[in-house]
C-alpha cells in the first residue's frame, strides 16, 4: 500500500467518522445498532465492494484494534458501574459467571460434538469456550439503556466484563491439550495454576495501577498541576497500561482492565463521569474502526463458506446454549422469569470471540479453519439479531 493510498483511506475514514457523528443519536434511537452500520460500511469498502481497504490487513493487526477497543470499553464501563446496586444484587453476575458460564461451555461442547462431526471433542470444547464469552461493546446498547432494571444492566455489565477474561485460561488450556503429543504435564493442578495465574495477575495489575493512578490524580489535583486537556487522557492511559502490563506478565488484560475500572470508578466517584467521557469516545472510535475492518477484511471473504451445520450451531449457540444455563443459574432465587430470559438472550458474541479466533488460527489446529468460520458466522448473526432486538426488548422489560 503506497503512501498516497494510505492518505486517501485516512481521509475517507475520517469523513465517515464525521458523518456518523451527525447521525449517531438518530441511529441509537432506531432499530439498527451502530456496529451493524459499521460492518455494512466495511463490506462496501472491502474487496467485494469498492476494494478500498482490507486487502492487505493481517489478523494480528485486527487483533490489536480489538484488544485496544476492549481495554478501553471494559475499563470505562466498569468505572461507570453502580457499585451500590452491585453490592445489593451481586447474585446476578456471580450466578451467571460461576453457573451460567460453565453450563454454556458444557452445553455448547455437547451440541458441537453432535452437529459438527469434523471436530474432535477438544476442538468442540474450544469452539464452545470461544463462544461463551459475551461482548461488552455489542451489549452497550442494553447496559446503558436507563429503562433496563439496574440489577439486570449491572449484572450483564459485570458478566461481560469478566467472562472473556475467565474464558482465556480455559481456551489456552484446551489448545495446549489439542496440540500436545502427551498429556503427562496437563494435570488438574496445572489447569488450576493456569486459570489462577491468568485471573490473579490480571486482578493484581488492574487493581494496583488503578489505585496508584487514582491517588496520583488526587495528589496532582491538590497541587493544581492538572491540565484540563491532558487530564482527559488519564483514564485511557491507565486502562491501556493495565491491559498491556497484564498481558506482558501472562495474565488476563481483560480482567485487569475491568477490575481496574471498578476500583478507579469507586476512588474517583465524584469526577468519574467527566474523566471517563473522553475514554468512552476513544473506545467508540476504535470500535467503529474495528467493525469496519472486520466487515472489509473478513466477512466479505467468508460469508459464502458457511455450511448449514455452522448456521444451525450458531443459532443454537445464541439461544439454547446461552439462555438455558443462564435461566437455570437463577433457580431457587426470586429473580423474575422475564429478567432471566432477558439476560440469557443478551449475550452478544463479538470482539472477544474474534480475538479467540485469531489465537486458535495461530495455534494451527486441524479444525482451526472450521472453528474460525463457525465463530465468524455466530458473530455475524449476533451482530444482526442482538442489534435489532436491543431497543425493543429493553423498552419491553422496562414496562414489566
Image (cartoon, helix red, strand yellow):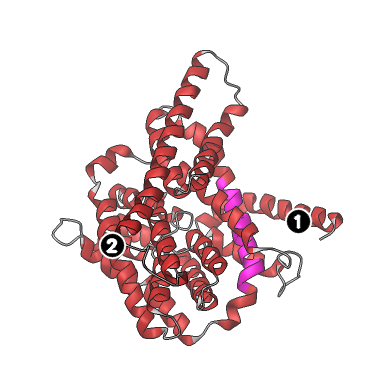
Closer to the camera in the image, 26 or 116? 116
Which label number is shown at residue 66? none
Magenta segment boundaries in residue numbering = 283-299
Q: Is residue 129 magenta?
A: no
311 with respect to 295 (left or right)? left
Marks 2/1: CA distance?
43 Å
**Local crowd at mark 1 within 10 Å, few (<14), some, or many (≥20)?**
some
Name the residue at the top extreme: 223
Q: Is residue 246 above or below residue 121?
A: above
Labels 2 and 1 touching (C-beta < 8 A): no
**Local crowd at mark 2 within 10 Å, few (<14), some, or many (≥20)?**
many
- To which residue does mark 2 refer? 100
80 with respect to 397 (left or right)? right
Closer to the camera in the image, 48 or 37? 48
Q: Give the quarter of the figure containing the N terminus.
A: bottom right
Q: Give the quarter of the figure containing the C terminus.
A: bottom left
Does residue 148 show up?
no
Residue that appears at 54% across and 82% down: 306
339 with respect to 72 (left or right)? left
- To which residue does mark 1 refer? 12
Residue that appears at 60% across and 72% down: 299
Amino acid at each position: 500500500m503506497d503512501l498516497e493510498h494510505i492518505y486517501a483511506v485516512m481521509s475517507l475514514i475520517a469523513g465517515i467518522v464525521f458523518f456518523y457523528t451527525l447521525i449517531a443519536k438518530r441511529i441509537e434511537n432506531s432499530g439498527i445498532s451502530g456496529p451493524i452500520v459499521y460492518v455494512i460500511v466495511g463490506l462496501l469498502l472491502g474487496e467485494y465492494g469498492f476494494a478500498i481497504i482490507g486487502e492487505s490487513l493481517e489478523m494480528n493487526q485486527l487483533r490489536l484494534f480489538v484488544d485496544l477497543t476492549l481495554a478501553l470499553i471494559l475499563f470505562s464501563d466498569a468505572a461507570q458501574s453502580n457499585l451500590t446496586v452491585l453490592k445489593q444484587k451481586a447474585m446476578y453476575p456471580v450466578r451467571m459467571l460461576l453457573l451460567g458460564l460453565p453450563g454454556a461451555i458444557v452445553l455448547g461442547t455437547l451440541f458441537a460434538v453432535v452437529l459438527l462431526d469434523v471436530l474432535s471433542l477438544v476442538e468442540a470444547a474450544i469452539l464452545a469456550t470461544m463462544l461463551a464469552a459475551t461482548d461488552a461493546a455489542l451489549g452497550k446498547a442494553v447496559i446503558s439503556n436507563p429503562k433496563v432494571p439496574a440489577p439486570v444492566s449491572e449484572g450483564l455489565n459485570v458478566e461481560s466484563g469478566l467472562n472473556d477474561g475467565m474464558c482465556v485460561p480455559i481456551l489456552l488450556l484446551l489448545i495446549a491439550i489439542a496440540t500436545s503429543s502427551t498429556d503427562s504435564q496437563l494435570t488438574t493442578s496445572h489447569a488450576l495454576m493456569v486459570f489462577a495465574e491468568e485471573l490473579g495477575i490480571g486482578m493484581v495489575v488492574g487493581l494496583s495501577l488503578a489505585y496508584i493512578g487514582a491517588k496520583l490524580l488526587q495528589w496532582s489535583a491538590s497541587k493544581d498541576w492538572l491540565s484540563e486537556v491532558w487530564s482527559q487522557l488519564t483514564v485511557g492511559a491507565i486502562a491501556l497500561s493495565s491491559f498491556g502490563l497484564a498481558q506482558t506478565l501472562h495474565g488476563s488484560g481483560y480482567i485487569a482492565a475491568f477490575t481496574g475500572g471498578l476500583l478507579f470508578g469507586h476512588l474517583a466517584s465524584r469526577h468519574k463521569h467527566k474523566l471517563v467521557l473522553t475514554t468512552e469516545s476513544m473506545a467508540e472510535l476504535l470500535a467503529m474502526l474495528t467493525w469496519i475492518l472486520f466487515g472489509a477484511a473478513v466477512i466479505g471473504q467468508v460469508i459464502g463458506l458457511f455450511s448449514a451445520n455452522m448456521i444451525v450451531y450458531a443459532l443454537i449457540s445464541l439461544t439454547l446454549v446461552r439462555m438455558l444455563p443462564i435461566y437455570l443459574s437463577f433457580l431457587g432465587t426470586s429473580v423474575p422469569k422475564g429478567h432471566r430470559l432477558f439476560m440469557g438472550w443478551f449475550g452478544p458474541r463479538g470482539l472477544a470471540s474474534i480475538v479467540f479466533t485469531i489465537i486458535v488460527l495461530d495455534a494451527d489446529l486441524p479444525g482451526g479453519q472450521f472453528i474460525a468460520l463457525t465463530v465468524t458466522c455466530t458473530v455475524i448473526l449476533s451482530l444482526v439479531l442482538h442489534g435489532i432486538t436491543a431497543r425493543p426488548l429493553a423498552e419491553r422489560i422496562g414496562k414489566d
